[in-house]
Image (spheres, helix red, strand yellow):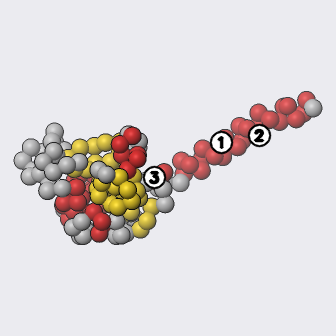
Amino acid sequence: MKLAIALIPALLFASGCRGGKARRGGVPPPTPECKAVVRTAKTYLPEEEKNRPLPKDCSDFVGKVFAENDIKLPRSSEAMSIEGEEVGSARELRMADLVFFSGKNGGRKIGHVGIYINNGIFIHQANPGEGVRQESLHSDYWRKRYLRARRILD
């Protein structure tokens, strides 16, 4: 009995270490291309670049950011949602992945797109005329509307 009690902490410690290592090692570091896309996207933030014209909407913003990095995407968020490779879950997101959301009324139809930055943060143009901003995927509003993600860059 004493041996079993002594082994429990060791087993818990060993399994905890193994689980943590697998999670941290699963996401590769961002490529230079992914970093460039995010850098470009951040230049659209109002505090960064005053002279940039506002994109018309969310898909215009994403299209312009990728075009500045020599990557052509379709014009609409719905058409963008079939480009690239499917990302299995929000836990697998990488820098520069496209994140897709339902519109204001909810449902399963794509109505919004943004660019994932890192640590649960994405950048997007929320509404025409409001400018570009960064927000958390974990906020109630966006978490409820998250539909899927696509990886355009490896």
Q: Position of residue 61 (x, y in %)?
A: 20, 56
Give the alpha-carbon distance from disc 2 to disc 1, as whole Å: 10 Å
Neighbor class of circle 3 (other Cα within 10 Å; few <14, some 14-19, many 20+) is some
Mark 2 or mark 1: whose residue is earlier in sequence: 2
Direction from residue 39 to residue 9 in the image, left or right: right
Q: Residue at the spot x=18%, y=56% of the render? A: 57
Neighbor class of circle 2 (other Cα within 10 Å; few <14, some 14-19, many 20+) is few
Which residue type does callout 1 highlight?
Cys
Direction from residue 129 to residue 118 in the image, left or right: right
Q: Do tag 3 and tag 2 residues touch (Cβ < 8 Å)?
A: no
Mark 3 or mark 2: whose residue is earlier in sequence: 2
Q: Position of residue 30 (x, y in %)?
A: 39, 55
The residue at which mark 1 appears reads as 17
Quadrant of the rendered image containing residue 62: bottom left
User: Is any atom of residue 134 visible in this view?
Assistant: yes
The residue at which mark 3 appears reads as 90
Give the alpha-carbon distance from disc 1 to disc 3, as whole Å: 23 Å
Q: Position of residue 111 (x, y in %)?
A: 29, 58
Residue extending furthest left? Answer: 51
Local secondary structure at mark 3: helix
Mark 1 or mark 3: whose residue is earlier in sequence: 1
Q: Is residue 37 above or below residue 120?
A: below
Q: Identify the image quadrant of the C terminus.
A: bottom left
Which of 99/71 is in front? 99
Q: Do tag 2 and tag 1 residues touch (Cβ < 8 Å)?
A: no
The residue at which mark 2 appears reads as 11
Q: Position of residue 5 (x, y in %)?
A: 85, 31
Residue extending furthest top? Answer: 2
Q: Residue at the spot x=48%, y=51% of the render? A: 91
Direction from residue 143 to residue 55 in the image, left or right: left
Q: Is residue 3 above or below residue 57?
A: above
